[in-house]
Image (cartoon, rainbow, N blue to C red):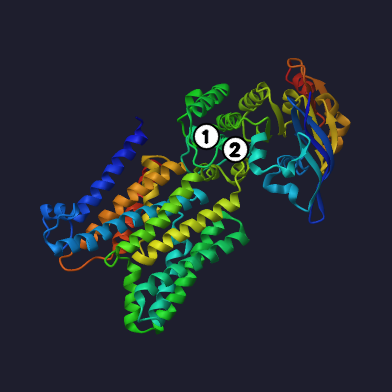
Amino acid sequence: MSTLINIFQLSWQVHNKAILKNINFNVCKGEVIGIIGPNGAGKTSLLRCLTNQGNILASTNVSGNVQLKNRPLAQFTAKEVAQHFALVMQKNETIFALSVQDVMKMGLLPHKSLFSLDSDHDKAQIALALQKVGLSEALHSHFNQLSGGEQQRVLIARALVQASQILVLDEPTNHLDVYYQHQVLQLVNKLNITVIMTVHDLNLASLYCQRLLLLDQGKLICDGTPEEVLAPEKLSKIFGLPCQQSIDAITGATQVSFYLNDNKVQHSDLLEKVGE
Amino acid sequence: MNKVSTILIVLVGLVLLSAMVAITFGPADIDSSQLMACLVGNCQNPIANVVIWQVRIPRVLVALVAGMGLAIAGAILQNTTRNPLADPYLFGIVSGAGLGATIANISLADNLTIALPLAAFLGALFSVIIVVFIAKVLQRMEQLLLAGVAVSFMLASITQFILYFGEPFATNRVIFWLMGSLARVEMSNFYVIASVLLIAIVTVLALHRQIDALLLGDESAASLGVDVDKLRLLMLGLCAALTATIVAYCGGIGFVGLMIPHIVRQLIGVTTLKLIIGSALIGAIFLIWVDVIARSSLPHAEIPIGIITSALGSIFFLFIMYRSRAIT
């Protein structure tokens, strides 16, 4: 697999506090990478640097190098960055009655010139992207009236219209119920493009990502397969809770469970107690 | 043809019809055959010719472009700040213009024809520069609007202080000017307003996709390659220039920028292209007819146009509040 992104010794310091410390890793084409870690570990900050949001790489507080296709990302214009990275943010609120079509058309922006209008090709792209996320019927629906899961799917479809090579998602399953969490991540997994996402739920990250990056206090602690990264001794130390690793009987994915020190009750014990 | 295209075609027809019909209104007794003859350059009555070409047509044309401009300025501000209550007046533009006009009235009483609109324009720009400066320091949208309100009150209080100690005739002139009127507009005013309006429309049409991207949040827009700060400053500057030009010639005409985009959103759509075209057309129709009411309601006097727009605007908003209560 060819390398798309190279990150060398990336550090970010704000008011003497290190947000990111000496981060090094590469991203290859087609990988689905999950960034995990506790709150404040630097997951979203890493995404900001990775996509040069707000031209953060030009800041004197940031050192190191982020390269996209062997060229420093800081040298790309904002439009070029948008042609390579499609971002799906945590919060996307609008008080105006935007239709799904209006939101989808925003994805065309990085490829459009001034004064440009929508072509038939654009309309076909929008229809195709909505079809891929299973929302063909929602073209004229109001974005605000969709469920959280549907809104995320629309934003992923917008990212498809943006035709970027790398899809970046910041906590895509936040505020979603279990059904939509799986639906959204399954969809992301099937797109066959490079995906980098922050995920809070370690078991979801394990199930849907080929590779995980574990961050803690701005440091990259571990980079590897879910089985390697979700090692109980590492997770126990970082999250401050005893942890157990297992293999899910149905999916075959590595799973972890945490329990409090003063309440060492396991799932199997609970099942015994209820007589199953 | 889709619904939006049909509505826009009907609106273009209504703008032309409104402008034509509005020319027939006025105290001078000119019948339709005389009017038509004067319009096609075959006028037998020189007085009717003067009334039509130097009074009525400039007035209707200024109403048309001022209505377009105020509605467009409101629409741009609302979409770029994601606030449906954003209005050029909320940014202190009229208060700044009022202060400029007051200073001109008090200090340059002899040559007000040029000095009044020029001073009003400079005052409006001054207020926007302060608001933009505060916005740059604060970098928060909700505080940008509050900064506008604060600047508006500050400049209004300075104006009132000057007027309180000023000469009574000058005070009267300023108060009447602030109420808004198209009674003294000339064809040259139309050309100036139309030029600024054209620049504003072309700029917004060029950047309509960037402005739309702001509707889903600054972060989202930035991720699509938009320089959010630069775009917002450009749009604020554009609205300031547009409103200041209109206020300089027509005085204070409130609520148009607040009311018209609201109607357009319900009727045509929320994205910038639809909102700007719809606001321009409905704004033009609205102000042409408000001006007709202003000059034909009373037998030998005119009602200041700003009084009518404010009255209609407040009723409109009570209606909107009642309707949203009924929905929720």
Question: Residue at position x 51%, y 50% from top?
Answer: B80
Question: Residue at position x 86%, y 28% from top?
Answer: A231
Please, what is the three-letter code of the amino acid marked with disc 1?
Answer: Lys
> Helix, strand, or loop for circle 2?
helix
Task: Say if labels 2 and 1 share a chain.
Answer: yes
Residue that carries the numbered disc 1 in the rendered image: A105
- The answer to whether the residue labelled 2 contacts the one labelled 1, judged by CB atoms less than 8 Å apart, is no
In the picture, which quadrant includes the C terminus of chain A? top right
Please, what is the three-letter code of the amino acid marked with disc 2?
Answer: Pro
Residue A180 point in image, percent of width and height:
61, 27
Quarter of image, res A218: top right
Q: Is residue A73 above or below residue B35?
A: above
Quarter of image, res A224: top right
Q: Does residue A138 appear in the picture of this structure?
A: yes
Quarter of image, res A200: top right
> Helix, strand, or loop for circle 1?
helix
Give the CA separation, mark 2 to mark 1. Answer: 11 Å
The numbered mark, 2 or 1, whose residue comes first in the sequence reads 1
In the picture, which quadrant includes the N terminus of chain A? top right
Camera-side residue of A137 and A118? A118
User: Disc count in the image?
Assistant: 2
Camera-side residue of B319 and B19? B19
Q: Chain of mark 2?
A: A
Q: Chain of mark 1?
A: A
Q: Is residue B37 above or below residue B223?
A: below
Say few, some or many: other residues with alpha carbon within 10 Å of mark 2 (under 14 / 14 to 19 / 20 or more).
Answer: many
